[in-house]
Amino acid sequence: MEGNRGVGASRSYVLEVPPLSSPLTMHQMEFGQAEENLQGLGFMVPSHGISFPPSTAGLPFDNPTAVNSEKPASKPWSNEEVGTSDPKVGNDQNSSGRDGADSCRWKSASSEKSKVKVRRKMREPRFCFQTRSDVDVLDDGYKWRKYGQKVVKNSLHPSYYRCTHSNCRVKKRVERLSEDCRMVITTYEGRHTHSPCDDANSSEHEYFNSF
DNA sequence: CGACTTTGACCCGCGC
DNA sequence: GCGCGGGTCAAAGTCG
């Protein structure tokens, strides 16, 4: 797309994933420590109640290497509501969100459309960060189901994932930089309504639940 | 057989 | 208003 469609306030980070030790497993990582690292490094921990990179928070990385790296290509995600509409977003997400759409497809009735429009504008809070990894899908403790992939500009093949947990509408988008295939940009949208343990039985993931 | 992935089509928002 | 491009749907295919 030409113009930045409202380059959003999506937060972005760059994390370097150690090449070995399957970067995606949340192994023995000290999440608390990780968080400190993040903050110490200037990572922004949202203070307004949105889910910190839902599960991204404690990402499985020991050593985040860079900070606040803007996404290379402008991403169209206007994230204005990040700081303002969390509660609404949460409600929307839980009550009418896409699930509404699940039962009554949003492309059907015209009356629905108006709702949808509103909903569409009310984007979920988003977090994006970059990682250097050979694998696309980070094991953040949640279970994801791919629901789409598309070739877009400035990105090879962004994949779209949705949390498989019922009533959880969290989505994430995974894309690789065209310039550096090892760079993976993961964007989380929404907030988990359950703990990672519901999906993956790992005590480490309990940490995420605090967000 | 159920869960998941792939993929083409569709819809909508935004810039011009 | 039009066209482009991103995001999502859903049928079909694949896998365990």
Image (cartoon, coloured by chain):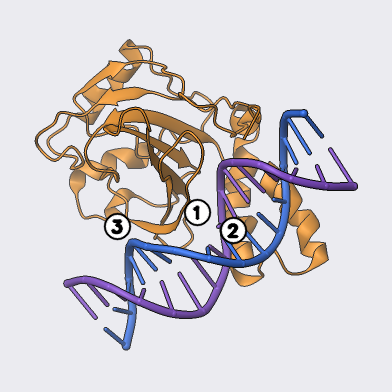
Chain colours: A orange, B blue, C purple
Q: Is residue A198 above or below residue A186?
A: below
- According to the image, label 3 marks what residue? A199
Q: Which residue occupies the extreme left position in the image?
A: A20
Q: Chain of mark 2?
A: A
Given contact means CB atoms under 8 Å apart, are the residues at marks 3 and 2 in contact?
A: no
Residue shown at 64%/58% (left/top)? Answer: A96
Q: Position of residue A132 (x, y in %)?
A: 26, 29
Residue shown at 39%/60% (left/top)? Answer: A164
Of callouts 3 and 2, the N-terminal one = 2
Q: Chain of mark 3?
A: A
> Label 3's element?
loop
Q: Amino acid at mark 1?
A: Arg
Q: Amino acid at mark 3?
A: Asp
Residue shown at 39%/57% (left/top)? Answer: A146
Asked whether the viewer can see residue A123, the reply is no
Q: Residues within 10 Å of mark 2 (few under 14, many from 20)?
A: many
- According to the image, label 2 marks what residue? A98
- According to the image, label 1 marks what residue? A169
Left or right: where C8 falls relative to A129: right
Q: Chain of mark 1?
A: A
> Label 2's element?
helix
Q: Position of residue A37 (x, y in %)?
A: 27, 17
**Disc sitting over residue A91 in the figure:** none
